[in-house]
Structures are given as structure tokens and as C-alpha cells.
Image (cartoon, rainbow, N blue to C red):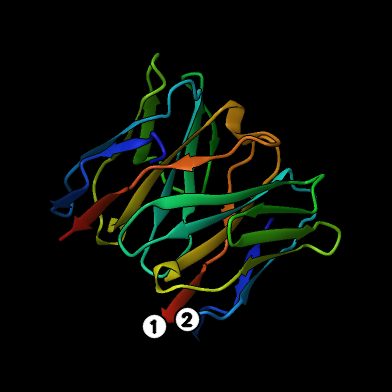
Amino acid sequence: ETGVTQSPTHLIKTRGQQVTLRCSSQSGHNTVSWYQQALGQGPQFIFQYYREEENGRGNFPPRFSGLQFPNYSSELNVNALELDDSALYLCASSLEGGRTGNTIYFGEGSWLTVV
Amino acid sequence: KQEVTQIPAALSVPEGENLVLNCSFTDSAIYNLQWFRQDPGKGLTSLLLIQSSQREQTSGRLNASLDKSSGRSTLYIAASQPGDSATYLCAVNSGNTPLVFGKGTRLSVIA
């Protein structure tokens, strides 16, 4: 039990639609990161939020966007869904962005299938 | 750009064996190295975190070592059990940078 919860656990969307995924971080953690994991691959970094500000972004297009709220929970929004967006989306929380000695904790993920 | 490689990609061993999983990274300027376990269709469970100043960490039957200068880490699993079957992922970060993951090693422990 990591204390990081994600919703929904599974969802199916049609190409071109929009999706919102949600994450509640572990209590006291001020940093939330989102990762995309395709089958058979390691997770790829999408972006990170620290104290409600985006402070890092991976190689993902602008149709991937996010928010972090004052309670440090977070949302990942994906517009104009494409078939290749089908993946497991993982949320990770940490204290101070995973600086030295700070463990990063992951949720169970949200499985997105785009048809 | 940091790159993480895990060898082997898959491993099958009989129950009771001791085994070693390998992880290498290209940029030695890391703050932390973290080993995770992932069961099929599930999220990541943190197993061990090694800070850059540390050489190893132990938790139960697991021991992880870090040789920062050579860019290598190993995860040693003693007396393997069928319940250890999962994918093991290695990841590194530097300060406030995101984790960079390897593709993982898929472990099967046969009873």
C-alpha cells in the first residue's frame, strides 16, 4: 500500500475523444509525476508538478496536460486521443521531487484503451 | 541523456535459487537509484532505494548494490520463491529530475 490512489482503473475511449485521469498523492507529498507505460516497456516521463506548478516535462505533445491542486492531488488530461495513447498511466508522488533519499511512490495506474 | 539498461530481459529459475538482476546507467551523476517490482497489469512497488553516497541496501531476502563510478547496480534475490515472479525495474534520478527507467527484467520462479 503506497498511499497513492488513481482513478479510474480501466477505461475505454474512442479515437479523438478526451480523457481525464486522477491521482491522490501520499499524505504530505508535494510532488506528483505522471508516466506512460506501453506494454513491455519501462515507464516514460510525461510531466511533473511541484507545489501546483509544472516543473518538468518529457517528450509528449501539448495535448497532454495536467493540473495539481492545493491538496497536491493531480489530474492528467489527454485531448484528441490517438490509438498509440493506449497504455498504463502511472502517477507517482514524492516529497520535494525525489531528492536524495526521498523514495518515490507509485499508484496502481489507469489502463487506457483507445479504439 | 541518461539511459538505463537492464540485463537479462527475462529470466526463469527453479524455486530456491539465488539470482542477480543487473542494471546499468550511462550518466553516473545520479542522486538515487530505485528498484521496483511490477506485477502483471499493476503499478510499481518500491523495493529498495540507494542514495548516491551508499553502496548497498538490504530488505529481507533482497540486497541491492550500487557502483556509481561504473554506472552499475545489481539486485540480489536470495532463496527465490514463486511469489517473487514479477517484472523488476531499475530507475535513476538526479536531484529534481524525473526517474529514468530501464525496460525491466521479467522473472519467473518455477515451483
* Relative image position of residue A15 (x, y in whole percent): 17, 54
Q: Is residue A107 above or below residue B86?
A: above
* Relative image position of residue B13 (x, y in whole percent): 50, 84
Q: Quadrant of the C terminus of chain A?
A: bottom left
**Furthest residue in direction right, as rendered:** B69
Label 2, secondary structure: give it.
Answer: loop
- Which residue lies at the image location 68% right of the left edge and 59% below the top edge? B64
Chain at numbered mark 1: B
Label 1, secondary structure: give it.
Answer: loop
- Which residue lies at the image location 56% right of the left edge and 81% below the top edge? B17
Graded by Cα atoms within 10 Å as few (under 14), some (14 to 19) or many (20 or more), the crowding at tag 2 reads some
- In the picture, the disc for residue A56 is none
Circle 2: residue type: Glu
Quickly name the residue at label 2.
Answer: B15
> B102 or B63, which is in the foreground?
B63
Q: Quadrant of residue B91?
A: bottom right
Q: Is residue B92 left or right of residue B27?
A: left
Q: Is residue A43 left or right of residue A19?
A: right
Quickly name the residue at label 1.
Answer: B111
Asked if badges 2 and 1 are on one and the same chain, I answer: yes
* Relative image position of residue B65 (x, y in whole percent): 73, 60
* Relative image position of residue A63 (x, y in whole percent): 34, 41
- Which residue lies at the image location 48% right of the left edge and 40% below the top edge? A105
